[in-house]
Amino acid sequence: MAAQPTSELTPITSHFDASPAGVLVIDAKGIVVYANPAAGRIFEQAHLEIVGTPAEILEPEAWLAARVTIKSGAPQLGNRLRLDQCNVLVNYLPVYADGLVRWVMVMMGDPWDPEQGSLYPEPYKAVASQLEAIMESSFDGLWITNNQGVVVKINRAALRLTGLPREKVEGRFVGDLLDEGNFNGSVTLEVLRRKTTVTMVQHLKSGKKILATGSPIYDAEGEVAFVVINDRDITLLDRMRRQLEESEAQLEQFRSTLLEKQLEEMSDDHFMCRSRAMKEVYEKALRVAPTNSTVLITGESGGGKSMLAKLIHAKSPRAQGPFVRVDCAAIPTSLFESELFGYERGAFTGASSRGKPGLVELANQGTLFLDEIGELPPEHQVKLLRFLEARRMIRVGGSVEKEIDTRVIAATNKDLAAEVEAKRFRHDLFYRFNVVPLFVPPLRERPSDILYLLDFFLKRIGEDNQIHKQLGPEARTLMLNYSYPGNVRELENIVERVLILSPGEEVRPEDLPAEVRKAQDHSQDLDWEQGFDLRQRLRDLELDWIREALRRLGTQRKVAQHLRVSQSTIARRLQEEEDSTIH
């Protein structure tokens, strides 16, 4: 007995076993994988014996047409096929799986007389009825329009999406439906204009948001005969996406708030540093604090820019007002405008029914701190510039302009002048911020502050955790010699780690992190009595210099230029060190 049709097709082909119209299914290799009894009668052989037969042998003309549908993915309707036994009208319909045309359904309906042109509609009506049933069973909305843009057929799912009755849609020109405001754009008209498949997002009068794809169906002359449109409701998906982005933004804001609470516990004494460099920064901050001037704080991450901004606020006439921190790097691009300026009720899908004030509005009568301003996307820089120029804003979805009285402080770890040169940051926005620039030098450039900060953190963290320990002299020396690439934040983290994890009452060198122990001066551990390997000492020192230069400059090319060697030398030394570590 011949093979049965593949199980993947059973849900489709089972509907055609009793059909009076002949139905064949041909796979992409040209093999007939299904034939119903009516097809057997047309070809005058048992239908199960047809299964497994190459279509080219069974009917060459039908196979040629089926190949066109396999390659193009376009249905062919109303073709005429001359057979030895009879002549029939044939439709070739693509059957997709995993986004590809896997099979072609050949539906042989009306017999026709080539000389008299007579048609016998009853079998064709049965096929049409089955096609309509398949169309109505689709969860997605389906439209069929003719080449004039008139709706020929629409299924129940599409009517449900539009909220319109069938009699208000079928038989009407889609342009009229568009003019009535039922949707904001017509995929049908775009397909007819471009003569190709078109996909667009549409907003319906019913309030739903859909993804519509229109595909042209060509006639024998290659002209568009029909347009088939598939509508998929993405309202819920879009709402869930917005809610997820808003939740992520809120989570990031909660983290920022938690960080602010931790920073608030630190006293102003944190700024009473010993180094001349920091004293100058501190003095400038105190001088600018009583004014309303915009301040731009620059410096490496972890150097204390946020604390300096809080200090300026605390020493200003706005000290009793809010200090609102905006982490420009943490807010998703799609939510930035609504988070910064707020939104009115109903401004967008998923918006709060009461509306929401933005961070700018919350900073009224206080200080707005724009942290990591260098990460602000270009499309939002112009919106922020308008606010800085006029100190006025409009909520998203609103029409009322509000005047905001706030002092603006910005901070970044980037070189904004270089960002302007690279056209990643607007020059006019840069000059708006760069009224009073303050540069916080990295901790490695002010080593006299390290000892004071060590004692400060030992005391504060010890009191918070009820731990009373001291740094031993050797551990203190190692801490003083370390370069702290993470600046003050790294110093604080190291102190907290060793206080909690060290076993004794005194922190010893072995209690310190490995990177701190490695940073000690190599000249201090030379064994002058026993001797030492000078070449190895020089290699270690050379590698330390390369690592430090790489940390400061960022790339091997810049390191090579700075140390006046070739880039291959830098790469080779780093690779040798990595290989020795692995082995």
Image (cartoon, rainbow, N blue to C red):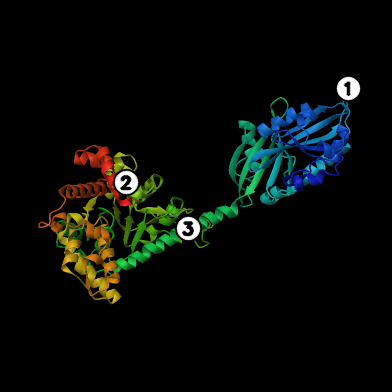
Q: Which residue is mark 2?
A: 429
Relative to 290, does residue 134 appear above or below in the rendering? above
- Picture coordinates of residue 473, whole percent (x, y): 16, 68
- Mark 3: few/some/many CA within 10 Å (<14, 14-19, 20+): many
- As helix, strand or loop, the secondary structure at mark 2 comes to helix
Q: Amino acid at mark 3?
A: Glu
C-alpha span from label 1 to label 3: 69 Å
Q: Please, which residue is most extreme toward the left here?
A: 529
Which numbered tag is attached to residue 115? 1
- As helix, strand or loop, the secondary structure at mark 3 comes to helix
C-alpha span from label 2 to label 1: 80 Å
C-alpha span from label 2 to label 3: 27 Å
- Picture coordinates of residue 472, whole percent (x, y): 18, 69
Q: Amino acid at mark 2?
A: Leu
Comparing 12 with 395, the one in front is 12
- Are discs 2 and 3 less than 8 Å apart at CB? no
Comparing 64 with 397, the one in front is 64
